[in-house]
Amino acid sequence: MDVTDEASVRSCAAEAVDAFGGIDIFHANAGAVRFGGIDGQPNQDLAFTLRAELDSVWPTVQAAGHT
């Protein structure tokens, strides 16, 4: 599942509900980081990391809550 893609997240949540009858507990523990030195790491790496680590939490919690 791509936690930055809302359709992927909704699909995974629906599969979990179909397989297990619902979602009782949700643990947001996914992400991706691009490491590098502050003097040479491009802004795109920071944007990627923030999206994967922070922006991914809301769609996954929201999808689990709508099941």
Image: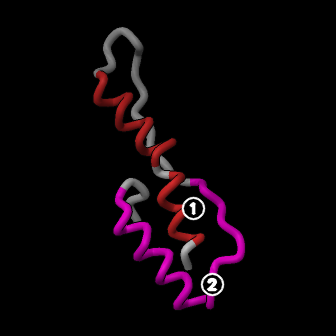
Tell which residue pokes out farthest to the right in this image.
24
Tell which residue pokes out farthest to the front in this image.
66
For image coordinates 42% across by 36% down, the residue present is 49
On screen, 4 above or below 34?
A: below
On screen, 55 above or below 42?
A: below
For image coordinates 28% across by 21% down, the residue present is 42
Quadrant housing the N terminus = bottom left
Tell which residue pokes out farthest to the top in this image.
39
Badge 2 marks a residue whose secondary structure is: loop
The residue indicated by pointer 2 is: 22
For image coordinates 56% across by 79% down, the residue present is 67
Q: Nearer the viewer, residue 36 or 20?
A: 20
Query: Which mark is drawn over residue 39?
Result: none
- Gap in angstroms between the C-alphas marked 2 and 1: 13 Å
The residue indicated by pointer 1 is: 61
Is the magenta region chiefly helix, strand or loop?
A: helix
Image coordinates for residue 47, horizontal then vertical, percent: 35, 32
Image coordinates for residue 19, horizontal then vertical, percent: 55, 90
Q: Quadrant of residue 33?
A: top left
Contact flag, marks 2 and 1 (Cβ < 8 Å): no
* Total labels drawn: 2
**Left or right: residue 21 compared with residue 43:** right
On screen, 13 above or below 46?
A: below
Q: Nearer the viewer, residue 11 or 67?
A: 67
Magenta residues span 5-29
For image coordinates 38% across by 60% down, the residue present is 2
Colouring scheme applied when the structure was drawn: secondary structure
**Does the stretch in magenta take in 21?**
yes
Q: Which amino acid lies under the numbered mark 1 shown in the image of this protein? A: Val
**Left or right: residue 22 compared with residue 9:** right
